[in-house]
Structures are given as structure tokens and as C-alpha cells.
Amino acid sequence: MQRAEDMALGRRICALAFLALAYILYSWSWNTVDVLRPYIAADLGLSLTQAGSLYSAQALGALLGAVINGQLADRFGRRNALMAVMVGFGIMLILGTLVTSYVQVLCQRFVLGYFTGSMYPITVGIYAALFGPAVRGRVASVIMGSSYLAVSLLGFASATVFSLGLDWHLLLWVGIFPIAMAAFAPLVIPNDRKLIAFGAPAHEGLRAGGFPVKELFSPVFRKQTIMLTLVSGLNFFAYQAFSGWATTYLKDERGLNDSAIGVSVSWMFAGSLLGGFFWGWIGDRFGRRAAALGFFLTAGLILVYLYAPISPMVLNLVAFGYGTCLACSVVWGPWLAELYPHHLKSTAASIFQWGRIVSFVAPLITGQMAEVVGLSLTMTVASVVFTIAALIWLRLPETYRYAASPKALVVEPSR
């Protein structure tokens, strides 16, 4: 057995770099469902409803993958689970080149979601064991930044492929890389089954037994788990209620052209990319609950975005601020891992994905509301929901307190 504290920093940074690269490949695979949607639909002759359902199938697979594989990772080793998941989503991405019908692509997206949805809890479980609480927020920012970088790379690659007149299926052959990378994981990622997690007592159980998710609903953790699930669900609902309708709002309510809409979305994305690093530092400096301020600011910026008589340029700045504040959830990875015992890190991190079940119904609910009360008022609901989520967030336990002296750094798991 080896303590994470005793492991060379260089080796831990190499492990983080491996995770970041794996996360780029995961995010690339996940976002093909959106970026390549019109081309998949055109090739298979899908209706708009059928094309939209591909995301629902992928999100359902992600929910199941997070719940099931998060537990398997805690039970049988997170490095082992990481390798299996990388091979899984790599194969499923490549199989996207072979689908010829709606049923086939629906199944392919469901299984792809099953594997990609596992990456968040597995990755959190690995880096939370390797790094101490004083830097976990910023470590999480690196992972989140990798995810956003992948979206940019996918957009650039797709534009290049189409400008050269190449087949868009080439973008799916990227699945070869996670399959190949998985073989090198044992050389870079420490074996968590022989590792005492950073800050963990040597006598604490290193592996979960039975069904780890049952421990999350034990009397000690039940209320906390339910509240965390609620916060995650409210986050996804509010995101869908505002961001999901943002382009429609800009086109129908503000009357912006397609180019201006694309610029506004880019500002929002840029804000999220930079905001992750800012809120990661906030979480490391002032505690995990301090980042709840981001949801309060997000709620206020939504109102400015919808109702203030501002120019398109100022609107873009507000969109940038919204994206920046929305990234406050970057601290949830370390926070979820710290709220539960060390042997439940990946299972606990999967709570983030549990909220996705709300995203299935959010477009339907908000769509019906928009037809009755209008789009602006419907999107205002996101402001209310973000505020409620922030209030619940503040009622949950703090796990980290910063002090000027390194000896005073404290992690306080909820026990």
C-alpha cells in the first residue's frame, strides 16, 4: 500500500494529464450527438423529433452508466473501470459509422451514453484520491476545461472536414484513440486498489462492498444524498429552461440573425471555459459552498439578459457572465467526493448525473409553458430554479476550510 501524499508530484500530474486527455476524447464522443445531428439525420432520413431523441437516448444511457459503473469502479477499481469505459465508448463511437437505421442509431447512442456517462464519477474518484483538498477545485477545473476544449476541437475539425469535402464519418474514427490509450493506463494511472487516498486514514476500507449506492441512502447519508440529487436536478432543469431556449429567444424575441446568434453562443461558451478555473480557485480558497454564489449571480444575469433594454454587444457580455457563473458547479466533483467516505468516491460523484433524469422532461415542460405564457416568462423560471438550487446548496455540509498555514488545511467529511 502507498499513500497518495508520498507519491511523487510529477507522477500525479502525469496521471492528471492522462485523465484530461481521456476527458477530451470523452467530450468529443459525447458532443457528436449535437454537432453532427443534422448530418446524421440527413444520412438516415430522420425527422426533427427522431434526431432530437438521439440526445434523450444518450442521456438515459449516461444516467444508467453513472449509477452502475460508478459502483463497479468503487468495488473493483477505478483504474480498471476507466480502461473498460474508454474502450467501450471508443468502440461505440466507431460503430456510429455503420448504423443504417433509426433503431440502430438510437441503440448506438444509448450504449455510447452508458459508457461516456461513467467518465465523470470515475474521473472524480481518481483525481480526488490523488490530490489534496487545497487544490482539488483547480484540478477539477483542468478536467472541465478539457471538456470545453473538446467541443472547440470538434467544431474546428467538423468545419475542416466539410470545407475539404471529406466524409463526416471521419470524425467518428477518433474512437480509435481512447481504445489505444486504455492500454497505457496501467503505466500512468496508479492502482487505486493499492493506494491510500489523499487524507484517508490507513485503516479505512479502500473498496466498497455489496452495492455501494445503498450506503448513500443509509440513515447517516440519506438526507444529504436526497438534497444533492435535488440540487443536481434543479441545475439541469434550469440549464435546459434557459440555455436550451437561448438561440430560439435570440432569433424570435430579439430578432438577431444567425451570425449574431452564433457569436452570442460563443461568448457564453467562452465564459464557461474561463469560469471553471475561477470557481475552482474560489472553492479551494473559500470552501465548496462559497461557489453557490455563482448560482445566485446566474439567476440575476438571466433577468438582465431577458428584460434589460441593452444592445447586442452588452447582451453578449451578459451571456459571457452567465457562462462564467454557471461554471460554479465545477467544485461539485471534489465536494461530492469529500462528502462521503473514501471508498465511495465514484459512487458519490455519480449523483451529479442523477439529475439528468430531470433534463428528459425539462424541454417538454418548458415548451408547453412557452406556448401558454411566452418564451421570456418561461425562461425566467430558470432564474427562480437556480436561486432555489443555491439555497439548498448552502444548507449542505462544508467539507473544506482554508487557512493561511498549510498545517491548518482541513477536510471535514460528513460522517
Image (cartoon, rainbow, N blue to C red):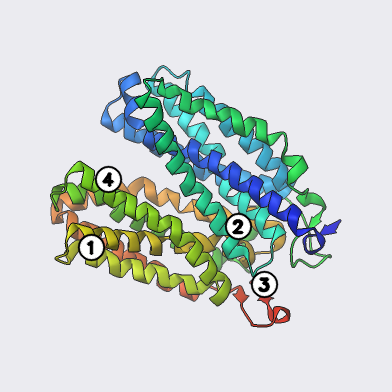
Q: Are marks 3 and 1 in contact (CB under 8 Å)?
A: no
Q: CA distance from mark 3 to mark 4?
A: 47 Å
Quarter of the image where the N terminus is located = bottom right
Please state, as top left, top right, bottom left or bottom right, where the C terminus lies in the image. Answer: bottom right
Residue drawn 59% across the image and 48% down it = 20
Secondary structure type for disc 3: loop
Label 4 secondary element: helix
Query: What residue is at 36 percent from the left and 71 percent from the top?
Result: 296
Q: Position of residue 164 (x, y in %)?
A: 38, 23
Disc 4: which residue: 262
Question: What is the crowding at mark 1: few (fewer than 14 residues within 10 Å), some, or many (at least 20)?
Answer: few
Residue under numbered circle 1: 314
The kind of secondary structure element at disc 1 is: helix
The disc, 2 or 4, on the residue closer to the chain's N-terminal end is: 4
Residue 96 visible in the snapshot? yes
Residue located 50% across and 47% down the image: 147
Residue position marked by numbered label 3 in the rendering: 415
Q: Nearer the viewer, mark 3 or mark 1?
A: 1
